[in-house]
Amino acid sequence: MNQFDRVRDYLTGLQDRICAAIETADGQARFTEDRWQRAPDDAGGGNPPGSGGGRTRVLKGGAVFEQAGIGFSDVAGSRLPPSASAHRPELAGASWRACGVSLVFHPRNPYVPTTHANVRYFRAERDGEPVAAWFGGGFDLTPFYPFDEDVRHWHQVAHALCAPFGDTRYPAHKRWCDEYFFLRHRNETRGIGGLFFDDLGGDFETDFAYLRAVGDGFLDAYLPIVDRRRDTPYGERERAFQLYRRGRYVEFNLVYDRGTLFGLQSGGRAESILMSLPPMVRWEYGYVPEAGSAEARLADYLVPRDWLEPPR
């Protein structure tokens, strides 16, 4: 089995395992699957030609999750979209193939954080010769009403899975996550971070092992938080704040997220790419939380810091 197929098999199995765990955690709803094929642009729409497909799975209206989406894709193209060639200009004109699993879960209870995870593999060729290949991914957490023990747990799991790969791995990829998931127009992070990495292409076996550590570690990081917060009482005020803060999630995904831009510009399936957006959201002009309120407290968590240490 070649390297790409090994990664592909791992990713399809990861999607299966996460779906089963989330269905168990929710206890009510189940994922529905939408299998799709990526059609070449033969209708003059301007999308780069390509091939491949995937399976998009979405859980709706659950007891815990208002919407949970997790998609697997294996797609290829004859040329890269502008967002990718601008990031890596040496890839201009290269053919490519990429596979990955990406998820975003939007819980119903405002005290349960929204979360995102992604693990992926990319390779490019020109005239039959390899140009580049790398892994990318990570996971991050977006609470609305944060709890210190949840934030520490999230980062402790991230730190532990990084440890076998050297002392510098966690601080480097934690910092990368803080910098990547930053809304410059709001001057705040999207949440309390986690791990983010891209262009990891030194040694295939070591890098693939790290990808698996991140993918396998996601449920260990997230499900204990869900279990602690899923039954926390809430009212209309908390729900309204949750919907307002979901607006920040939409802003980031549509303005900054490289994966969203790559998917749309490469002729990807819009329905699958945009499943990350929340099912309900609201914006409010000039909203300022009441001083000293639980809502105002969130701002203190949207600034990067060392979450492994107890707060002073």
Image (cartoon, rainbow, N blue to C red):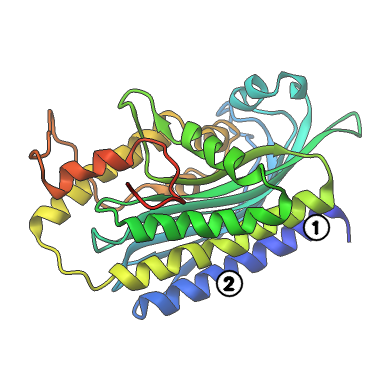
Residue 4 position within the rendered picture, expressed as x and y whole percent measured from the top left: 80, 52
Callout 1 crowding tier (Cα within 10 Å): few <14, some 14–19, many ≥20: few
Q: Quadrant of the N terminus?
A: bottom right
The mark that comes first in sequence, 2 or 1, is: 1
Residue type, mark 1 in image: Asp
Determine the residue positioned at 49% across, 31% down: 179
Q: Which residue is mark 2?
A: 17
Rendered position, 47 above or below 209: above
Residue type, mark 2 in image: Arg
Residue 244 position within the rendered picture, expressed as x and y whole percent measured from the top left: 20, 43
| Left or right of 131 on screen, residue 100 | left
Determine the residue positioned at 15% across, 49% down: 294
Q: Which residue is mark 1?
A: 5
Circle on res. 88: none
Q: Quadrant of residue 98?
A: top right
Callout 2 crowding tier (Cα within 10 Å): few <14, some 14–19, many ≥20: few
